[in-house]
Image (cartoon, rainbow, N blue to C red):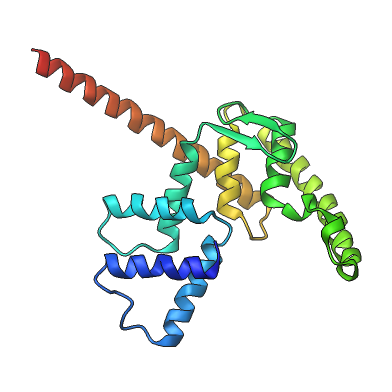
Amino acid sequence: MEREQIKLLLQKINVAHNKCYDKFTKDQKTQLIDMFFSHLKYYDNDDVEKAFYNYESENEYTPKPAHLRKELNYMNAKKKHYINESNHIKHDDFDKVTRQSLQDLLIDEYCPVLKMNIMNIDENKRDFILSRANKMRYSIMEFINQVWNYISETSDICNYHLQIAINSVRGTKVSIKDFMREILNAHDLSEKLKDEEVINNLKKEYIKSTVKS
């Protein structure tokens, strides 16, 4: 998201919640924009808008960035497929994470500097960016190896658990411990969604049976 898109989002929130930001001072509004931007800048604008409308449909309180990120995680948990556009490798969300899918998802989603077209960069900046990319490539491969050591010992971590975790930490520096915690949180979230789906299906079947009788 761009800052201008954040401003438009806040205008929608303001209208939906009785002009809750109208009494803010100029400095407070700037801080508000900064806060939302820092949390949502790595998300697609269309996805954030969907998350906002999803939240509004079920909640009466003014949304905070954490509320919208939670909705975005729910949306990601319900996706069926992830396509790696840079190398055209398709990873099914519901497949167990492999060493290759872990590497593809982390490098493409978390480390965009590793896949930038260096020939399109200004020559004066090229050496600096190459140096940074090489250091990052080494550190991210070490990171991947350590994460894989943990994931390979589990039996039910899927690609979409990893996607949710990446979205939760995108744009931040994160430790192995923090990243693994996000993966486990994503797993718990998906299990909760499955339980809710089972309960809803049972309710529908019960309603159908009572209507027939």
In the image, residue 213 above or below residue 131:
above
What residue is rendered at 58% in x and 58% in y? 42
Label count reads 0
What residue is rendered at 80% in x and 45% in y? 141
Along the line of sight, the residue nearer the viewer: 54 or 146: 54
Along the line of sight, the residue nearer the viewer: 76 or 2: 2
Looking at the image, residue 185 sits to the left or right of residue 12; the answer is right
Residue 106: % across, % down:
69, 45
In the image, residue 160 above or below residue 109:
above
Residue 195: % across, % down:
36, 30
Looking at the image, residue 153 sits to the left or right of residue 48; the answer is right
Inspect this view and state whether residue 85 appears. yes
What residue is rendered at 56% in x and 47% in y? 182
In the image, residue 32 above or below residue 202:
below
Along the line of sight, the residue nearer the viewer: 160 or 14: 14
Looking at the image, residue 91 sits to the left or right of residue 17; the answer is right
The residue lying furthest to the front in this view is 120
- What is the quadrant of the C terminus in the image? top left
